[in-house]
Amino acid sequence: MRSKNTDSFFPNSWYRVATSAELLAKKVIPLHYFGKDLVLFHTETGIPCILDAHCPHLGAHLGYGGQVKDKTIRCPYHGWLWDHQGYCAGIPYSEKVPQVKIANYPVMEVNGLILMYYHQRDESPTWKIPQLAQYDSKQWTPLRLVHKWTARTDLRNYLDNSVDVSHLYQVHSQTFKAAKSDLVEIEGPVLTHKMSQKCNLSSLSSGGLISEDGSVTTTYYGLGYDVSFYQTKGTLELSLLQIFTGTPIDNNRLEIQIFFSVKKALPSPLNQLLALMLKKDTVTTFEQDIPILENKIYPSNPLLQEEDGPIARSRRWANQFYQ
Ligand code: FES
Ligand SMILES: [Fe+2]
């Protein structure tokens, strides 16, 4: 039994719904994404599962008071059990077990995040998000949440903004100067975009400017998840990794979380400080985009200049997730 998609039109992709740290053993978490009420839980056998939230018996929400028992979740209302695939697994006061199923969704856990696959027609995923070599590496600070935002925007507008080169030094001039797009590679659901730019590392010099040559390579895995590597070369050789995740709450709202790790380039305590400063830059930079994203429209025939970056190409690539 699948809850009805209304007029929602979300791209088919993997989406962050929680962090591994939030989903402890036997934990039950109510979720609301893609205009749906959902429940996420971790079975005693260690499997993360997502089901539609409402129990088919009399409609209780499994995420509020539901309890994990072995491989099942127990409804808080009359105690019916539902297994990790959504099948009814028992009724405490009846011998009869109805052949009924709650909709379940593909889930994967990678790089400290719990991801759910959403598909408009409930098709199974044909690709996955890869493990990052830097995750768990001693040379990198632990991947941590930088910040979360709920913004009145969507993933098509986010993608336009993310590959847009000319806005970098117009909107984010405290961080970027003279950016240019160097390379775009496309392989199925993966798009890689490399840019080079001058970076102003303002927060590292108390508001003064340190100007460095830098590059950023962003790899988009579908539309809800991308990984960026920033590097500067010069007096400061900085490397940082950033995971962007955007999960639609409904047709109007996107929940954005950015995660972040820095290569340990300095003596031990200073790396945390470096991470904190760069984290501040990341928040400032993203918050400069939010008022634009929240109030812009999405023209289907924008007046693009070559210097704007690969907006038309990334739009063509993104169409595959809306089919
Ligand atoms: S509503 Fe879930 S067991 Fe009755
Ligand atoms: Fe931006």
Image (spheres, rainbow, N blue to C red):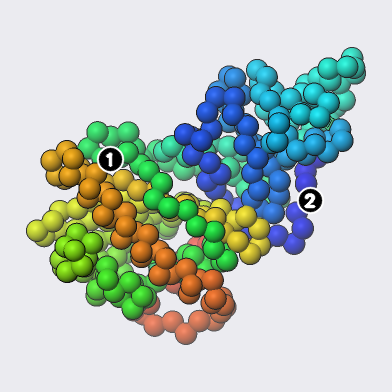
Name the residue type under label 2.
Lys
Q: Quadrant of residue 101?
A: top right
Name the residue type under label 1.
Thr
Residue 159 placement (x, y as % from top left): 47, 65
Q: In front here: 26 or 233?
A: 26
**Element type where label 2 sits in the image:** loop
Measured along the vertical axis of the image, is residue 5 above or below residue 135?
below
How many numbered tags mark residues here?
A: 2
Residue 290 placement (x, y as % from top left): 47, 68
Q: Pointer 1: what residue? A: 141
What's the residue at 17%, 38% (across, down)?
268
**Element type where label 1 sits in the image:** loop
What's the residue at 16%, 62% (across, down)?
205
Which quadrant of the figure contains the N terminus? top right
What's the residue at 79%, 51% (across, down)?
4
Residue 256 placement (x, y as % from top left): 50, 55
The picture quadrant for ligand 2 comes to: bottom left
What's the residue at 48%, 74% (across, down)?
292
- Give how far apart the Cα atoms at labels 2 and 1 are: 43 Å
Is the CB atom of the residue marked by disc 1 within 8 angstroms of ligand 2's nearest atom? no
Residue 314 placement (x, y as % from top left): 46, 66
